[in-house]
Image (cartoon, rainbow, N blue to C red):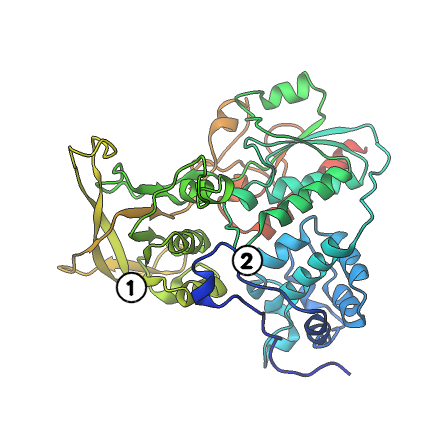
Amino acid sequence: MPNMRPDKNPMPHQDPQVRACNFNEVALGYTKEQAIDEAQRCLNCKNSPCVSGCPVQIDIPAFIARVAEGDFEGAYQIISKDSALPAVCGRVCPQESQCEAKCVRGIKNEPVGIGRLERFVADWHNANATEKAVPPASNGHKVAVIGSGPAGLTCAGDLAKKGYEVTVFEALHLAGGVLVYGIPEFRLPKSIVQKEVDTLKELGVKVETNMVIGRAITIDELKEEFGFEAVFIGSGAGLPKFMNIPGENLKGVYSANEFLTRINLMKAYKEGADTPIQHSMKVAVVGGGNVAMDAARCAKRLGAEVYIVYRRSETELPARAEEVEHAKEEGIIFKTLTNPVKILGYHNPDDPRDPKNGSVSGIRCVEMELGEPDASGRRRPIVKQGSEFEIDLDCVIMALGTSPNPLIKSTTQGLETEKWGGIIADEHGLTSRENVYAGGDAVTGAATVILAMGAGKTAAEAIDKALSK
């Protein structure tokens, strides 16, 4: 008989007042007893609706059944057939809108905690497994993967399992892409990302860091001079967007990408770090997505009073509900239906650190109200006349989304892109160039880790079909 408990086993967390002052992981993970109890809530539905909500098609009922039996390694082996990054996905995948949204238990009560179980299984494997992955025999084909984020790592892992000689080219000095530069340590410890990368290396995947494709070497050179028969572009979307309002060139204005990269990749929050970060007193983060929540919670941990400034209502916040809840628990102040119109500044000629164009002293905003739906289906925010007000600040972080870097497009002849910069690819990931594939944020713009992984998986299948003819 299944366990008919109506709610999920709660996830243990650090106390909000404690975690707001450190960068240790917030969620502490299930115990073995909690994992087994949660797994026993699964009804093992005949039609497995949860699988239809998973972009990489993990056999969810099968792995949960193994957890219910206490066979945690068996559960991991089932997950790893379809996912190259189970410990990552168990932490950052939006299960509530994907697999768990399809769970039958969720119709009347809470769905099975699929993501929490995936995390538990992956962590158990990483802590207890001693055998290394064994690379298969080479099939003689070479594939280049550009970018070591979730799309690139998934494509590389799936191809390596089939015997392809895969080389991943990463622009930064560490592999992991957005997993290492974008997502904070308290949500995704970097040791977990490194473990996943190491597993792919055991399968035979080569990783070349500090390689900016389009600058150090072009896609055409990869194919013509280095013998790569196919190329997958998973370079992400790292070019930040701004509002183009007055004051964005003041000292103390960051893009969320820069702010998070300094903290996550360069460890600027640590004493004596080589890469500096401004330790502000009051910070406004403009935006309402997961990146905005990450930036706000990082600024809070650096000691600031932090505001989320978002032009729509709280109902329209695109961030995961869990991230919003955690931010509120940690003391982040939400200023919704609010839009900045100017960043205010001052100049101190006696301070050599104060730049010529000045430093942030505040932000001028207007109140908004929601009108008719726009093209996205969300109600369009409209300015309330005469509603201007100011907030005193010394830092503004713009978390307004990103677009793909144009470098690869500009150095690859015949590679077609959208007007906004995304690479055009068909449903299999094939671009306008023969045997050049693309997926993830480089195609769609900023999206989720699991959707990028799904694109990498699809492209790997297409590459294998094309090269194994």
- Residue 91, how many percent across, how many down? 59, 58
Given this view, does label 1 or label 2 mark the residue nearer the observer? 2
- Residue drawn at x 37%, y 64% is 331
Nearer to the camera, 244 or 344: 344
Q: Is residue 407 left or right of residue 276?
A: right
Using the rendered view, name the quadrant where residue 465 is placed: top right
Q: Quadrant of the C terminus?
A: top right
- Residue 164, how many percent across, how many down? 78, 33
From what the image shows, is residue 22 above or below residue 425?
below
Nearer to the camera, 378 or 205: 205
Q: Earlier in the sequence, mark 1 or mark 2?
A: 2
From what the image shows, is residue 93 above or below residue 350?
below
Q: Residue furthest right?
A: 137
Q: Which residue is disc 1 drawn over?
A: 370
Q: Amino acid at mark 1?
A: Leu
Using the rendered view, name the quadrant where residue 434 is placed: top right
Q: Which residue is disc 2 drawn over?
A: 25
- Residue 3, how many percent across, how many down? 71, 81
Nearer to the camera, 2 or 210: 210
Neighbor class of circle 2 (other Cα within 10 Å; few <14, some 14-19, many 20+) is: some
Nearer to the camera, 220 or 262: 262
- Residue 291, how many percent across, how many down? 44, 51
Q: Is residue 446 left or right of residue 88?
A: left
Q: Residue furthest left?
A: 386
Q: Secondary structure at mark 1?
A: strand
Q: Secondary structure at mark 2?
A: loop
Q: Amino acid at mark 2?
A: Glu
